[in-house]
Amino acid sequence: MSIIINLDIMLAKRKMKLIELADKVGITIANLSILKQGKAKAVRLSTLNAICRELKCQPGDILEYVDDK
Amino acid sequence: MENHNNLSKSADNSSTEKTGQKTKLAGVLNVILTFILILIGIAAVGLFVGFIAIMINPKLETFNSYDDFRLLYEFSPIDREQNFEVVSSHAALTNSEVKLLASINFQIASRKFVVTFFFFYFVILGWFVNILFQLRNFLRTFNTGNPFIRKNVQRIRIIGWFVILFPFLGIIFMLAMAPYFKNIIVNPATPVSFYWRSFLEYGKDSLWAIIFGLVVLVIAESFRIATQIKEEQELTI
């Protein structure tokens, strides 16, 4: 899996805690931490929509593609 | 976003209703299976007690020859090659029946036979116990709401293989019993060994086991795919 999640960077920039974001977005803290650790296999567009809405950023700020080769 | 919340809420409600009904059935089956396993456990204990009782019986000797057997049981002089006279106070058996009984008794009244026989009975009992045990553990996971775990795939696969290989275990059992039964001729007029004929009958009956085992293995494979999908869905944010 070569999609890197830069959620912690965005959280630091917006000075928001993980728990706070989880409440605002409407997903569990466990799920959000799975996303933050990069263990997620898939992200729903609705969830991504909510995260970008709350962090006031673009999907590219959170998701980054890195070539495996 | 609100639509999505409503959709997910209604989906959760219907799935908990369904899992509630399903866990009831699983609970009943779990109780039945546990009960069956306890019964088999009692049967195994009884089998073991019987085995010990037979083995410590001083009359159970290892007969090196038919003559030793005859001496112990005080038959009148008997010529093994020809039909012999019956000395019996009960209703007269035909000569061939007595010969059949004598041939069986001679072979079976030995420690080696008892040990082999009981050993295979315990193996077969354990075979069934394992199948039911795996099934019981598989059903127990239904209560958690998620039966799609890797351990369950393994359990179903074990059930499938144990069912397929059971007839072959029976063949091995019959081969092990060969030295005791191969000399028996049921009807002296037609001297065909019933022992080798019994293999044919056994093969015909065991076809269903192989078919059923194959079906279970196919189910195990579909369960593996379902587990894969479930794991992926769990890691979907």
Image (cartoon, rainbow, N blue to C red):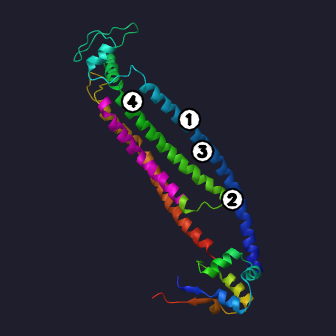
* Spatial separation of the CA atoms under disc 3 and disc 2: 20 Å
Tag 3: amino acid: Leu
Tag 4: amino acid: Val
Tell me if label 2 and label 1 are in contact, CB under 8 Å. no
- The x and y percentages for residue B100 are 32, 21
What number is the disc on residue B33? 3
Secondary structure beneath dot 1 equals: helix
* Spatial separation of the CA atoms under disc 4 and disc 1: 20 Å
Q: Which residues are magenta?
A: B152-180
* Spatial separation of the CA atoms under disc 2 and disc 1: 34 Å
The residue under label 4 is: B114
Sequence order check: which comes first, mark 2 or mark 4?
A: 2
* Spatial separation of the CA atoms under disc 1 and disc 3: 14 Å
Residue pictured at 68% horizontal, 90% vertical: A10
The residue under label 2 is: B19
Q: Quadrant of the C terminus of chain B?
A: bottom right
Q: Quadrant of the N terminus of chain B?
A: bottom right
Sequence order check: which comes first, mark 1 or mark 3?
A: 3
Residue pictured at 36% horizontal, 28% vertical: B111
Q: Residue furthest top?
A: B89
Q: Say if labels 4 and 3 share a chain.
A: yes
Tell me if label 1 and label 3 are in contact, CB under 8 Å. no
**Disc 2 packing (10 Å; few <14; some 14–19; many ≥20):** some
- The x and y percentages for residue A36 are 64, 81
For residue B69, above or below residue B126: above
Tag 2: amino acid: Thr
Q: Nearer the viewer, residue B175 or A7?
A: A7
Splitting the image into 4 quarters, where does residue B66 fall? top left
**Disc 3 packing (10 Å; few <14; some 14–19; many ≥20):** some
* Spatial separation of the CA atoms under disc 4 and disc 3: 30 Å
Tag 1: amino acid: Ile
